[in-house]
Amino acid sequence: MSWPRVFASVVASAIGLAFWWALTEPLPVPPVILLGVAAAILFCAGLIAGNGGAIAAPVAFLFSLFVASIIATQLHQAFRPQTAPVDEFNGLISLHFPEVVAPLAIAVVIGAAGGWVGERLLPSHGGRPR
């Protein structure tokens, strides 16, 4: 596992997902599109991280929810100052503990699949024998 690849994956994916959650939160985006784009970003997190995909994807997912909550709250409060902090995205993804466990488990599976593919495309060991 290459820690620079894992770190780069977490940063890039968390930022991308955070803006996806925050900007689509007030819009009537169909669940298939909303979750499909998120799954594609998490798969790419695994591609970037390689063997660390099972770690990178759920960490990026969790960070993205926190950052998206901040962005979405700021966007809402810019227009309606009395708006409560955003802690749920389109009724599908929540920041509350029991509800976030299943999406985190799914992120582990998607990241691991992306990592498996990513490791075959660009091995972490750089072509050297292990």
Image (cartoon, rainbow, N blue to C red):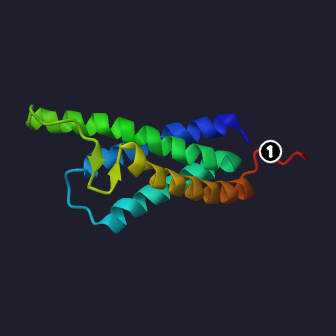
Task: Please tell me which residue lies in front, 47 or 63.
Answer: 63
The residue under the point 67% across, 60% down is 117
Q: Quadrant of residue 55?
A: top right
> Is residue 25 visible from the viewing direction of this image?
yes
Above or below 90: residue 68: above
Task: Please tell me which residue lies in front, 108 or 130.
Answer: 108
Seen as rendered, the residue at the extreme right is 129
Task: Please provide percent x and percent y for residue 21.
Answer: 33, 48
The residue under the point 14% across, 34% down is 77
The residue under the point 41% across, 41% down is 64
Above or below 44: residue 3: above
> Which amino acid, by three-letter code, is at mark 1?
Gly
Task: Please tell me which residue lies in front, 74 or 108.
Answer: 108
Task: Please tell me which residue lies in front, 125 or 74.
Answer: 74
Task: Please provide percent x and percent y for residue 125.
Answer: 81, 44
Task: Please provide percent x and percent y for residue 42.
Answer: 51, 53
Dot 1 crowding, Cα within 10 Å, few <14, some 14–19, many 20+ = few
Q: Secondary structure at mark 1?
A: loop
Quadrant housing the C terminus: top right
**Residue hosting label 1:** 126
> Is residue 13 visible from the viewing direction of this image?
no
The residue under the point 64% across, 40% down is 5
Q: Quadrant of residue 110?
A: bottom right
Quadrant housing the N terminus: top right
Task: Please provide percent x and percent y for residue 91.
Answer: 27, 56
- Left of 28 or right of it: where is 57? right
